[in-house]
Image: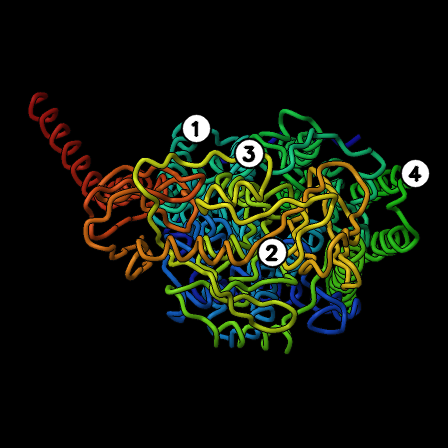
Amino acid sequence: MRTAQRTTPRPVPRPAAVRAARAALAGRPSRVTAAVCALAGLLAVTAVTAGDAVARIFPFGPRHRSVNDLANQFVPFHARLWDLLHGRADGLLVDWRAGWGTSFLPDYGTYLSSPLAPLVALVPREDIEYAVYGLTLLKTALAAAAMAFLLRRLSTAPAPWWPAVLGAAYALCGWSLAEGAYNPMWLDGLIALPLLCLTAEWAREGVRPLLSVLTVAACWTANFYTAWMATLGAALFLLTRLAATGSFRPRTVLRAALSTALGTALAAPVLLPVLLSTRTAHPGVVRDFAAADGADLAARLLPATYSFSSPALFVWTGVPLLAAALLFWREVPAAERWLWPGLAAAVAASAQWGPSHLVWHLFATPNGSPYRQTFVLAGLLVVAAHAGLVHGPPPRRALAGGAAVVLALTAAALPSPLAGRPALLGGLLGLAAVTGALLLPRRGRSALLALALVTGTLLGQAAATTAHADRARLGHLDDYPPYGPEHARRAAALAAADAWPARRTDSGLPRVAGNDPLLLGGQGAAYYSSHTPAVLTGLLTGLGGGWTSRGRNLHSLDNPVTDALFAVGARWRDGAVVRTETSLPLVTVRPPGRPAPVFGPSPFRNQELLLGARVYGSAEGGACPVGTEVFLWAPERTGPARLGGRAPVRLLGGGPKRRAALVSLGFQPAPGVRPEVPAGRGPAELGCLDHGRLRAAAAALRPGAALSVTPTAAGLRAVLPAGTTGTVVVAAPAVPGWSCRGGPVEPYAGLLAVRVSGASSLDCSFRPPGLLPGLAAGGAAAAALLLRPAGRRWARRWAQRRAGSARTAVR
């Protein structure tokens, strides 16, 4: 009877020994590693593009790729970055285009701070969707290469093509193909996990302290949300690695913690404004976590499955096979045999438990997919699969045990509706192919055949999963047409009418996506972000605006009164840009002594309070006076509304996710004509706008308004009539971070405002909350890094002096 051999713990390599070993291995091995990383990236890109081509999705077919937040947020924000890099937009602090003027640094830190994002500037702006798709492929390839590099760094014992295949398998996990594909900012986390595990390995060996800190800083700057998850995964990797090698030392953990702390501090100038902005953002959907069904969990290990509410666990059949085979691999030391599969199982279990679920997701259940940490599990499974290959090809007994585990998981998936015939067939054929490849001899044609079986299975399963996810997303999520000639025509018309800052040009309705001003141009109310300010949502809602995504996706408000209040001089409507005749300057003045308006339930009354004049008449008997423009406010209703024989206007309301904006039904054609209003719950109020009164109200405010306004990347300057006294009101939301000379900011019904007396100018600056503390933290971390070599030299000299003093005392 064979028994496992006892092994002694392997010592931690000393830094000098490590450097000497690397010097001895310089040359050909480094070229091999580069080739391995390149192959991993090539396999990943090949599988993704093949799957997209099979699905006939953009850019390989007529189906839309821009779904959900990809169209609403990521493509428009990258278009804004393109404008910024080409000198056509404001700076990093204020975004004057969207949301009537909002803070931009939090959006930059959330969506655009990846080191790869500036590459979009290399393509024409009209090809921005191609650029974002290219970034997606590039990030997937880099994730594969980074994992392959990590595996080669852990051990060069397996045949070089194994790290390439396993690295590609990690980058092609179900999370990447189903979730990361349309959330490209998350793919920075996919890259970060192997990089942070690499810094953990450097901490274990006591090498590359500066590069470790810079790597952590790059990962946290690129995307803090997934970097948090990747950091947790890297910490678990380090602890398991230390336990498996018997090399645990507190100094190693402290070294890794110090690198992480310094790297995070370097990212603080971006990180702190992002975190503080979330506190003042309008709250999204609040959900209670519900664990996924066990059969669904097992099913998601199979290729070609899709579900929005269960973790995408697919990591190519070879990975769970090798990871499970490790349990039966007697030649592998017991610590490695049990710790790596045990770690993967523990992480999988933590995804199903409420408290640990909150830890993974920064202590808040996310609005959307509740298993965003799944890529960490995929990475740890890949490391477990590689841990066995370090000891050579798996023996038949271990391979049989691993195959039995995979078959048992497949059987457990049978009750799930997700485990369709393609998924089961793909999983079983893949298991047979990989198992057969592992049983083949490792020489000659047999080795080539094994390589073909392994890579063919990986590419086939990943391409099938990509195609299935592409098609399934179109059935589950909103989709939007790619940027085309109609978008270009609209953008050109808005650019021709643009007169900023004398007046705003609103991108108008119908909307293309959630951030039309960023994508198409102009300056309007439309805005969609995780950082949509609560003050902006409250302001727009009080004035009758509409939104989706529970108040975070704000729509353009087409109304003459709000156009006057917010300096909208032109807007897109009915296929063309139309001028408005009553727009005021961006900065106006209210008389002294007038209190700030307090909004009530009626948007018509709220508009009048903000304007300072009555402009709406009341409907008598359900009909407006002849000649007035009829507006309907029914925020909870859904359906067509019509006035007389005019074309119907469709409302799309119904809380808590949607709210319909007040809409114009046209001018009252004759006495007694009542509008047709869709039935439903909630109010349905009519407002009868008298345009003559509106013109008079605007004319009354115009003489005291600013003579000139100059918005900047970090604030706003305005020239006022000499001796201005009263409340200066800026047609921009009073988001946190504004300060003005001459007095404190006192919001005027949610607008930026300051009281002045005898002033001739207004000078306001904007500083995102957290920017100064972030710069201080980053500066302190940079100083610590710069002083670290000097500190080491001082410590060595001090130690030498003490040693010399000790020798003198002995003599």
Mark 1 or mark 3, which is nearer to you?
3
Q: Count residues near mark 1 (Cα–Cα under 10 Å), then give few for <14, some for 14-19, many for 20+.
A: few
Give me the C-alpha separation between circle 2 and circle 1: 51 Å
Q: Count residues near mark 3 (Cα–Cα under 10 Å), then give few for <14, some for 14-19, many for 20+.
A: few
Mark nearer the N terminus (1 vs 4): 1
Mark 1 or mark 4, which is nearer to you?
4
Give me the C-alpha separation between circle 3 and circle 2: 27 Å
Task: Measuring from the top left, give residue 141's x and y in whole percent.
Answer: 59, 62
Question: SS of the residue at dot 4?
Answer: loop
Mark nearer the N terminus (4 vs 2): 4
Q: Quadrant of the C terminus?
A: top left
Residue sitting at x 44%, y 40%: 750
Viewer can see residue 340: yes
- Mark 3 — residue? 600
Mark 3 or mark 4, which is nearer to you?
3
- Mark 1 — residue? 249
- Mark 4 — residue? 415
Q: Count residues near mark 2 (Cα–Cα under 10 Å), then give few for <14, some for 14-19, many for 20+.
A: many
Give me the C-alpha separation between circle 1 and circle 4: 47 Å
Question: SS of the residue at dot 3?
Answer: loop
Task: Indicate the quadrant where residue 326 lies.
Answer: top right
Given residues 318 and 554, the one toward you in this image is 554
Give me the C-alpha separation between circle 4 and circle 2: 39 Å
Given residues 261 and 170, the one toward you in this image is 261
Task: Indicate the quadrant where residue 512 lies.
Answer: bottom right
- Mark 2 — residue? 514
Q: Which mark is residue 314?
A: none
Q: Are marks 2 and 1 in contact (CB under 8 Å)?
A: no
